[in-house]
Image (spheres, grey):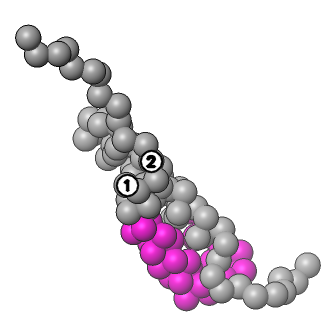
């Protein structure tokens, strides 16, 4: 079946890069040890890259579609910490005993 329709940007490549980036950022916020974070980041990065490569292999996207998708995902990921800082609730600290 021939492929038809618009192809820029690749929805698959955008979604996988955005999800991988968001998960990497979220895991970094948990305070997990650096080797674990690097391993998980590598796996998620390879997954996002493999999704993009399959789009090229199947011939449903050009390399420019993939690059545009990654740039779009990067733009959203740059905004992620800014939005999270203003929308997520702050950590509640335990009440301090009164002086005296």
Could you tell me which residue is drawn at 59 percent across and 84 percent down? 65
- Location of residue 91 with respect to 69 vertically, above or below: above
What are the residue bounds of the magenta stretch?
50-79
Q: Secondary structure at mark 1?
A: helix
Q: Nearer the viewer, residue 57 or 27?
A: 27
**Residue furthest front in the image:** 100
| Residue 54 belongs to the span the image colors magenta | yes
Residue 42 visible (yes or no) = no
- Location of residue 74 with respect to 38 vertically, above or below: below
Residue 21, by quadrant, is bottom left
**Residue 22, numbered circle:** none
| Residue 48 belongs to the span the image colors magenta | no
Residue 71 visible (yes or no) = yes
Q: Nearer the viewer, residue 47 or 34?
A: 34
Estimate the x, y position of residue 24 in percent, counting from the top left.
Answer: 41, 51
Q: Decide if residue 66 is on the left or right side of residue 32.
A: right
- Location of residue 38 with respect to 22 vertically, above or below: above
Location of the N terminus (image quadrant): bottom right
Estimate the x, y position of residue 25 in percent, counting from the top left.
Answer: 39, 52
Majority secondary structure of magenta residues:
helix
Residue located beneath label 1 in the image: 85
Residue located beneath label 2 in the image: 88
Q: Are marks 1 and 2 in contact (CB under 8 Å)?
A: yes
Calculate the distance from the C-alpha at mark 1 to the C-alpha at mark 2. 6 Å
- Location of residue 86 with respect to 78 vertically, above or below: above
Location of the C terminus (image quadrant): top left
Q: Decide if residue 17 is on the left or right side of residue 15.
A: left
Label 1 crowding class (10 Å Cα cut-off): few <14, some 14-19, many 20+?
few
Residue 94, by quadrant, is top left
Could you tell me which residue is drawn at 46 percent across and 53 percent down? 87
**Residue furthest right in the image:** 1
Q: Decide if residue 63 is on the left or right side of residue 44.
A: right
């Amino acid at each position: 079946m021939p492929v038809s329709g618009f192809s820029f940007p690749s929805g698959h490549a955008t979604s996988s890069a955005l999800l991988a980036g968001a998960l990497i950022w979220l895991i970094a916020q948990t305070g997990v040890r650096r080797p674990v974070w690097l391993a998980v980041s590598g796996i998620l990065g390879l997954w996002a890259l493999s999704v993009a490569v399959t789009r090229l292999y199947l011939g449903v996207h050009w390399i420019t579609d993939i690059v545009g998708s990654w740039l779009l995902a990067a733009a959203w990921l740059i905004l992620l910490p800014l939005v999270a800082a203003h929308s997520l609730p702050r950590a509640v600290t335990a009440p301090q005993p009164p002086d005296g």
